[in-house]
Image: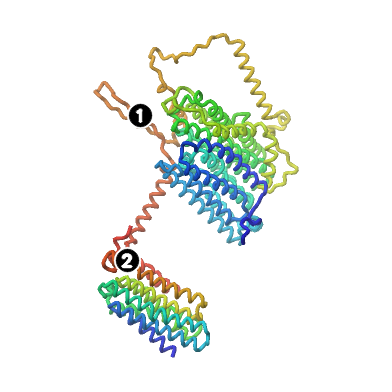
Amino acid sequence: MQGMILFAILASTYLMIIAKRMPALIRSFRYQSFCLFALTLIVALDHRQPDLYVVAGLLFVLKVSLIPYLLYRIIKRTKVNEDLGLFINPQLSLLWALGFTYLSWVFSAHLVISEKTALTSFLAVAFFIVLTGLFLMISRMSALAQIIGLLVMENGLFLLASTVSGGMPFFVEIAIFFDVFVSVLIMGLFVYRINKLFTHIDVNKLSRLKG
Amino acid sequence: MLDFFPKQFFLFDPLSIFFLCVIFVVSFPSAVYSFGYLKGGYSPAKITLAWFLFFIFVLSMAFVVTVSNVLVFLVFWEIMSLVSYFLVVFDTGHEKSIQAGMIYIVMTHIGTAFLIAAFMMMYKFTNSFDFNVIKDACQTMPVQTRNIIFLLLLAGFGTKAGIVPLHIWLPYAHPQAPSHISSIMSGVMIKTAIYGLIRFVIFILGVQSSWWGILLLVLACITCLVGIIYALMVGDIKRLLAYSSVENVGIILLGIGLAMFFQSINMPYLAVFSMIAGLYHLINHAIFKGLLFLCAGSVYKATGTRDIEKLGGLIKKMPQTAVFFLIGAMGISALPPFNGFVSEWLTLQAFFLGALNIMGGARVFLVICAALLALTSGLAAACFVKAFGVTFLALPRSNYAKEAKEAPFSMKAGMLFLSILVILFGLAAVKIIRLLAIVASSATGFDISSMSFSLNNFILSPQAGKNVYLSVPLLAVGLIVLGGACFAVYKLFNKTKVRIYKTWDCGYYKLNSRNEYTATAFSKPFRIAFSFFLLPYRKTQKIRESFYHVKSFVYETHTTPVFKKYIYEPLLASVFKAAKSMRSIQLGSIHLYLSYIFVTLLLLIIFMR
């Protein structure tokens, strides 16, 4: 079951890589977060830890519902072109992503000394998600892509923490959730401001601001 | 938790108490002086700010010399540096203040960086920030680590103390601060660096290699000479005093370096004796440099200029300030019976005693150092003849000087207090040496119960030992009697009439203050003598009406700022060049910045397996 979900996470991440438009990206992010929620729920059922239920609940409320909703709202409000603005086209991005998958697999295989294949694959997927988040931030022009890239990286870190080390301490987890939420709010505000000032949210065009 | 001043953070050994005394001896008269000095020159809000900064400044220095924890020491050290920065830029109206402040804060932070590096190395080895724990743990430290820590400490404290070539900030920062602050900065703040050297190198680290002392002696000799040669050249009176501070730090470090040298070759008596000489000169310098800066401040307040070429004749307008300045100048020129004489005498004695008691190359080295010290004191006397003569004697050279008025009472009170101390520290030398022996023994860790110290350790040959006798009060009485006798003889037998008239000018009848001997002219022989170092050059410009008639003639003479030109400017240029080349990777694109991070991450993943 867990393997299935892990595969779903991987698939949703690949979806993100090939997404050309903002709604598609947000939708895939929602899928990824939902899979993460499902994974946490299964772990919570297995271990019967009340803490994990709360974490899973927060995951659902924030990352599956609230943050995608906010992101959709940003798109609607700013009324910009829904294109993400690709530096690297989907096909090439896919090739990059395959490379990342291989690299993170090799890296995690080196990292885990014992022959626990399950752990290795969890680790590999987590690394892959982190790398993909960063890749999204780099290769997409829209400021929204940067926000989502950061969120994807956070998802990857969450996966890493919850699978490898059996979850971070409860309060740390909660704090991170709220950090992410607040950062989305703030970054959303910035996107509004950028849009208002320059009538676009294309980060590539902001290079004139350098000193 | 609420105990803000836990006992374990403080240390009141004789060394700390001595430095506390130095701080308050100068700060107190400066505070009194600042009543009169600040009044009229600044708005009430600024005066309040000045007082506020003043108190924090003095307090932070007091903490620096009394805390016993490295971290707390660093915190107060930084507070001291920052507050003094704000005091340097206190006259925000001047463009020069901002520039001086910039140089000061950059240099002081470079110094602190060295200190932090040294303290971190100490911590790494000892796992403690407490002075006493570090001291115990340092006994087993490997030589290599020890040497590196010493060099780092020397660079760090040397920047604050103004060891050449790290002295560059002193002549900028000290003149720009308000005068009562200059007197504290020059008199006391740079001494906290000496405290740091004594505390960390001699007290905590312990001197085991003799090259430490020799290195410090060489640096001190260079510092002395460079400081006083530059002091002779400059025309800004406060800048002159700042350069003279560089020189005096050199003399103090001669004593300290000698103490380190003797400590390393295990000669306790001489180590303690040299330390006494260094500490004695330290408190003396605090007193007379404080006094001289206060005098310079009252000259500045009365005339509005610090350029001595525009002053002159002030002895008639400001007689008391002139007397105070003269006392300070005599102290700093090491004339008996004032205090500077005693300490430089002690330092020279320490050199000769050392040269008599050790063999080999070190003997020659010590004698050369002593010779350089003698040269320095000679040049210092010349420098202060220039400073006093051009500022106070002859005719006023400008309207500023003509309009000068004597300083108000509070300013005179501050100067009077320090003048009395200049005389007192000369006359009560024997008592003070005994007190300083306690301080020196606590710093060096040698037992002094079986030693005796006096001014009469100067023994060139065993036979002469009993015949040499020096006592400063007797010397003073002798000088007074001699002077009185000369005066009486002059009064009794001199029958010529005094007629006040113009200087004979070959019938030109137009001699005025423009024809007076200037400071630049006075220092010309020294400029020629030290031309290999000063690299003087001149600019002349003739404007002709016709071939036969030169309408105006401009003549300027300058000296090349060697350290600025050959050390700091190339250094700065290379820093800027590096910064410019770094700029080519900074293109302003967020994606690019993110990809730097990404590439780093990928490389780490690839290479760290």
Amino acid identity at mark 1: Tyr
Q: Nearer the viewer, residue A30 or A155?
A: A30
Q: Position of residue B512 (x, y in %)?
A: 41, 20
- Residue in the image at 66% along x and 43% along y: B271
What is the chain identity of the residue bearing mark 1?
Answer: B
Q: Using the rendered view, name the quadrant where residue B471 is placed.
A: top right
In front of the other: label 2 or label 1? 2
| Residue B509, placed above or below residue B550 | above
Q: Residue at x 42, y 25 (%)?
A: B397
* Three-letter code for the amino acid on which mark 2 is drawn: Arg
Residue at the farthest right position? B450
Residue found farthest to the bottom? A1
Residue of label 1: B555
Residue A193, labelled with which disc?
2
**In the rendered view, does A64 fall on the left or right side of B294?**
left
Q: Nearer the viewer, residue B182 or B414?
A: B414
Q: Secondary structure at mark 1?
A: strand
| Chain of the residue under the numbered disc 2 shown in the image | A
Residue A132, percent across and down? 37, 76
> Can residue B82 be seen here?
yes
Residue B492 percent coordinates (x, y): 62, 11
Point out residue A180 in the picture as x, y percentages from the top left corner.
Answer: 42, 73
- In the displayed structure image, the side of residue B465 where residue B412 appears, left or right: left
Task: Please identify the quadrant where the C terminus of chain A is shown.
Answer: bottom left
| Side of A122 where B58 appears, left or right | right
Looking at the image, is B484 positioned above or below residue B188? above
Is residue A150 positioned above or below B382 on the image? below
